[in-house]
Amino acid sequence: MRYEGDIYSPHIAGDDYILQCTIGCSHNQCTFCYMYKNKKYRIREIPEILQDIELAKEYYGDIEKVFLADGDALSMPTEDLVTILDCLYDTFPTLTYVGIYASAVSILDKSLAELEELQKHGLVEAHLGVESGDEQVLRDIRKGVSRTEMVQAGRKIKAAGINLFVTVIVGLAGKTPKAQEHAKKTAQICNEIQPDYIGMLTIIVQPGTELYEKSQQGEFEVPEKMEILEEMRLMIQDMELNHSGITSLHPSNCIYLQGLLPEDKAQLMRTLTQIIDNKDVSQLRSRDTEKV
Ligand code: SF4
């Protein structure tokens, strides 16, 4: 298959065929993000993308899941995305899922009618990096949108009937008193958005990022494993969700949790509390702090 540079897709959708619609990320300024640093953002030409779909058919045969990358594939014009969706469903009769990376800016740039059109043409799920519900943290990491805009973007995806998967990053406020506030406000923003799924990640400081420079200058320190667990527990404790999946299966985490909220909240809290109270690091896995 033809790809330009490193390719990322959510771990939750690891078996997908990844179709590169954009190269890089339209924002590319988040201080912690290393994924597209070496790519200059551009939207690929439609004939090129349609040719890739033909190649995928030859290579994979029938497939069930496709993920549209790179960082912010929703930044493409809506009519182009409709063309891609139609071609995918025509080419793969067994296709049941198309997911996409979507930034808050790209979501807000589209009208609700445009997002509804994408849903009608088979866009099943959007992945939005919320990262934090703390306004100051969002500013510090140069997320490019305010907390209010993030909530609007998340709610708009849901209003269009598209499933919403958000990521939140534990440890993003560093090893500071602000960590608790970050955890509590991140729970609150999830409560306001009511996403279908929440993916918890733990901060990774990668060389080449602004956060790495800060850490080298002593301005940012990654919390210890137990502090990370305490942040996770605080987040889950304050989450009041009607029906959301939650997972920490991403390899950046030192613990794998998975469940439904509110149903599994007590169990998830018990698991975390047991490890924290016993200071039992033996149950924790090594965090994968390489590119994941
Ligand atoms: S975190 Fe997302 S929006 Fe921010 S630079 Fe990376 S890919 Fe772009």
Image (cartoon, rainbow, N blue to C red):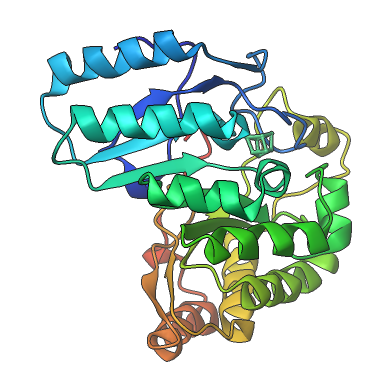
Pick whichever, 60 or 246, lies toward us. 60
Hey, which quadrant is residue 235 in on the image? bottom right
- Could you tell me residue 16's position as x and y percent? 28, 37
User: Residue at image x 12%, y 31%?
Assistant: 62
Q: Residue furthest left?
A: 61
Hey, which quadrant is residue 166 in on the image? bottom right
- Could you tell me residue 242's position as x and y percent? 49, 85
Vertical position of residue 201 compared to residue 95: above or below: below
- Could you tell me residue 100's position as x and y percent? 47, 41
- Could you tell me residue 120's position as x and y percent? 40, 51
Position of residue 174 in the picture relative to residue 128 (left or right): right
Position of residue 105 in the picture relative to residue 176 (left or right): left
Quadrant position of the N terminus in the picture: top left
Hey, which quadrant is residue 147 in on the image? bottom right
Residue 176 seen in this snapshot: no
Position of residue 151 in the picture relative to residue 60 (left or right): right
User: Residue at image x 26%, y 41%?
Assistant: 65
User: Residue at image x 68%, y 57%?
Assistant: 153
How many dots with numbers?
Answer: 0
Ligand 1 picture quarter: top right
User: Residue at image x 48%, y 78%?
Assistant: 272
Vertical position of residue 130 compared to residue 18: above or below: below
Pick whichever, 228 or 97, lies toward us. 97
Position of residue 74 in the picture relative to residue 227 (left or right): left
Pick whichever, 283 or 268, lies toward us. 268
Residue 244 seen in this snapshot: yes
